[in-house]
Image (cartoon, helix red, strand yellow):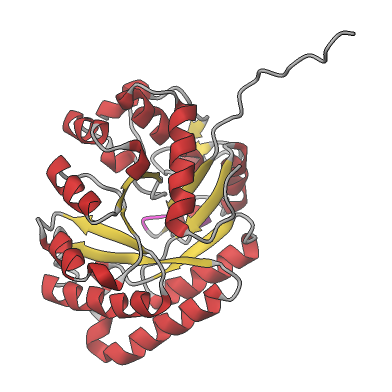
Amino acid sequence: MSSSPTNTTPEPPKFVEIGANLLDPMFSGIYREKPRHDGDLSLVISRAKKANIDKIVITAGTPEESRQALSLARALGTDTFRSTVGVHPTRCNIFLENRDAVVEELRQICHDGMTDGTVCAMGELGLDYDREMFCPREVQKEGFLCQLTVAEEIGLPLFLHNRNTGMDLYDLLKENRERFTRGVVHSFDDSLELAERFMDLELYIGINGCSLKKEENLEVVKHIPMDKILLETDCPWCDIRQTHAGYKYVKTTFPTKKEKQFEAGCCVKNRNEPCHIIQVAEIVAGVKGVTVEELAKVCLKNSYEFYGQFERPA
């Protein structure tokens, strides 16, 4: 009796996109306040699904954006889409106006979004010293601690922003480590020493195109253990370009047109989107000398453990 043929085709890699700014006007066809084409978010989402993205977390940077992200995730379908609640460090001046009211608004959005599991993290919160012209660092720190109060009450993990802050964000997190459950320092582009400090606090490191621009970035990523890495795009930002050091590892490309020559079915040049997470994975895998499938399997497990509320991956 002959046996049935065995299908040896490997499962395509599956991803969780932990950072997608899908509220950005670029996905409505608006670039630098100028309309260039009709909104194409549905096409962006279609490409994401073809890229085998299991979950997409829509990130927010103000209370209003947090409400919009929650509404968008629900409208698109919470089987795939989730959202965050938070205030970006460069927008923390709102805490000067009425701190208690802002904290209460964030708390209410979290409670609303957690009734059906749509809200899955607090963020994007943290520190950004490259853009103090928008908000001074002491106000950023105050805004961070205000949001930490909400995260502590509710138990949500932190989606963290860190830009050129030396040890300041690390020190804040270390001082308050007992006040939050889990955290990921997203879009990490700093030193291995700082990455190791964050990992000593049991934080994950988020890797996207901005983490892979220079050879020194690749050397840092090479030494970050796979079980501490979460993958993201931070779209529409942090796209991977041919001039970047990591590009030599990219195998998957997409038909692309400039925004002024927009064509349905094509990506837009220099506008990142969730489907490009495969390129992030290819670079990280190449740097580490493993297959994309091996890396993706570990990072998928990491993502599910980080959020703690998704059903477990097969």
Left or right relative to 4: residue 274? left
Q: Residue reaching furthest top? A: 1
Relative depth, front residue between 95 and 265? 95
* Residue at screen point 82% across, 15% down: 4
Q: Residue at x 51, y 30 (%)?
A: 254
Q: Which residues are magenta?
A: 28-32
How far across and down, in percent of the image, does residue 253 sit?
48, 27
Residue 24 image point, x, y percent: 44, 59
Q: Is residue 30 magenta?
A: yes
Q: Position of residue 143 (x, y in %)?
A: 24, 77
Q: Is residue 44 above or below residue 130?
A: above
Q: Quadrant of the N terminus?
A: top right
Position of 90 with respect to 306 (left or right) is: left
Q: Can see residue 268?
A: no
Instruction: Look at the picture and state if 166 lies above or below 51.
Output: below
Q: Give the residue drawn at x 65%, y 20%.
A: 9
Q: Is 309 or 264 nearer to us in this picture?
A: 309
Q: Quadrant of the C terminus?
A: top right
Q: Is residue 307 magenta?
A: no
Q: In this picture, is 103 found above or below 18? A: below
Is 118 rendered above or below residue 20? below
Q: Which residue shows up at 63% across the image and 44% down it?
A: 46
User: Is residue 217 shown to the viewer in this render?
Assistant: yes
- On the image, the x and y values in percent for residue 206 come to 33, 48
Q: Residue furthest front?
A: 1
Among the 4 quarters of the image, the one containing residue 134: bottom left
